[in-house]
Image (tube, helix red, strand yellow):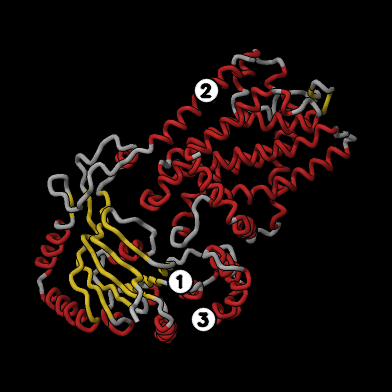
Amino acid sequence: MHMFNSVRQVVKEQLDHKDLIFRMASFDIKGMYQLHYLGSLWQVINPAIQVSIYWFVFGLGIRGGEPVQTSTGEIPFFLWMLMGLIPWFFISPSIIQGSNSVYQKVNMVSKMNFPVSLLPTIRIIGNSLQFFILMTLLMIVLFFYGFTLTIYFIQIIYYIISMFAFLFAFALLSSTISTLIRDYQMLLQSMVRMILYLSPILWDPAGGRVPDWMADVLQLNPIYYIIEGFRDSFLGRGWFFEDPLYLIYFWTLTLTILVIGSSVHLKFRKNFVDYL
Amino acid sequence: MKKQLKVEFKNVYKAFEMHAKQKEKLMELFSIERRKQRREFVAVKDVSFKVYEGESVGIIGLNGSGKSTISNMLARVIQPTSGEITINGETSLIAISAGLNNNLTGIENIQLKCMMHGLKDEEIERLTPDIIEFAEIGDYIKQPVKNYSSGMRSRLGFAISVHTDPDVLVIDEALSVGDSTYAQRSLEKMNEFRERGKTIFFISHSAAQVKQFCDTAIWIHYGEMKMMGDSGEVQKEYQKFINWFNKLSTKEKRAYKNKMLASQTSTPDNELVPRKENIKKRNTKNLVTSGVMLSIVAVLGVLLGLGY
């Protein structure tokens, strides 16, 4: 199928250089924290501070400590929020840094025989270390709360894959646009801040406080799909294939972004330096 | 034995937009406004040459004559506006801004850059001691690069690039920061390179250095190739020009410069760059695919949004 040639080429570049991606990501992490006294401990301290403030404002301040009602029973807001916030702590910087990665590094990279399409991926992989650490910590917290996981938890693998696929496609398209049009990066940063509140992270849009049609429209946001998927896995609310329309919507959207992203990337990458 | 052709420039032009507002850039991107009132600065004008393996070529010229544009095109950092560039093999560009990560140590930078050049782990391990020795950095190699002096930084950059074993080495004024002992050792390294059949481009505004390092020289004068030949001859002519120029009065000098710069400005009435018309082939296939997929997403989105 010739129409997916550009997708194939870009994906092949990632697979051919997977060792390089992982090692450059680890150098990135090293370089980031080398000057800090607490070093990579900041990978945990930073989110911990944010978690406590969100919990204070939304959990205590707004909800008054009331637990969240789900289809499988009650759950403390703190746990419910963490299940959405931890993926978000990975998604949000990956989108912003991934989009900025080409602009930031193309000057250095263009002097060598190095596929530019790896740059967004390196950022995503670099951020994923923190994600997996936080996920492990979440499991520990759940254990102390006496929370039991069900068989539904295995589908978290599917949702992690979905999240990576979406981030890869989005960062690829976004990094090209961001290099050509700098205003886009600014816009993106505000949008990401907005998406935090439009996703089921700090409050539950399906919880009956807003009209149903609004909750339905909010679903169109692909991050909604990912976050709800994580919760489905933890809370055992249902399987990912039980809502085929939503599944097909998410994957066609991701694939569309990937097709557009890779053809635009390949079209402009030779001239990236001219646009700096 | 016939020598292998390494680098060929065929009628190469490079033009940069003048006074390009950000908005105009965007318009051009989507080709809304096709070259109507564009003014361009032609930094490189109709340059053609051939260089074979084992040759070292010096490129000399005044400031702003287009030397660095040529070196960037040699390193494939930028693409020519018109014309063809053929390069057989890997190029490595050494410039003063070496592109090191300031937060990482010298050792880590060596590993990172070698990796990015596509070297294997064993090769990197083998090369690292050589690089450290050549860069003459000593114990500082374990320090973050941000603590380095500018000389150390560029020596490290040079050492890494030389040891990654490129087929074509482009050196852009990089040796001017080192002291003379370092320049001497770099010269030895370059000679070793040539013996192994590699090609070197040496970009400098110092004609003496070019004569010392290279057999052939190219004199770039306000974007045009004024002369190519034996480096001694070129140096003589270049020096002649410099002497003539220096004798001019300040006013004459300015007039000369303005005249030359004017000759590099391309306007729509006076196009200096030959462009093939209608080279823009739109890839409609991709457009159609994207359109079809977007409409599927839209339909699914409407269904979802209506709460099905």
Q: Secondary structure at mark 2?
A: helix
Instruction: Give me the chain letter of mark 1.
Output: B
Residue beneath the point at 51% across and 50% down: A117
Q: Does any portion of residue A241 appear in the rendered image? A: yes
Q: For residue B116, which quarter of the picture?
A: bottom right
Residue that badge 2 annotates: B298
Looking at the rendered structure, the secondary structure element under dot 3 is helix
- The answer to whether dots 3 and 1 both sit on one chain is yes
> Are there few (<14), some (14-19), or many (20+) residues within 10 Å of tag 3?
many
Please give the chain letter of the residue carrying mark 2: B
- Label 3 or label 1, whichever comes before in sequence order: 3
Q: Measure how far apart labels 3 and 1 are at the Cα level.
A: 17 Å
Which of the 4 image quarters holds residue B195?
bottom left
Q: Nearer the viewer, residue A122 or B55?
A: B55
Hey, what amino acid is under mark 1?
Pro
Q: Tell me the residue that label 3 is attached to.
A: B134
Label 3 vs label 1, nearer the camera: 1
Distance CA(mark 1)–CA(mark 2): 50 Å
Name which residue type carries label 3: Phe
Most foreground residue, A16 or A115: A16
Which percent across, then down, holds residue A29? 64, 56
Task: Give percent across and percent down for residue B122.
Answer: 63, 72
Q: Are marks 1 and 2 on the same chain?
A: yes
Three-letter amino acid code at disc 2? Ala
Judge depth for marks 3 and 2 and give the one in front: 2
Question: Which dot marks residue B166?
Answer: 1
Q: Please tell me whether residue A82 is drawn above or below residue A62 in the rendered image.
A: below
Q: Could you tell me which residue is drawn at 43 percent across and 81 percent down?
A: B196
Residue found 52% across the figure and 22% down from its top? B298
Badge 2 density bin: few <14, some 14–19, many ≥20, Cα 10 Å: some
Q: Position of residue A120 (x, y in %)?
A: 55, 48
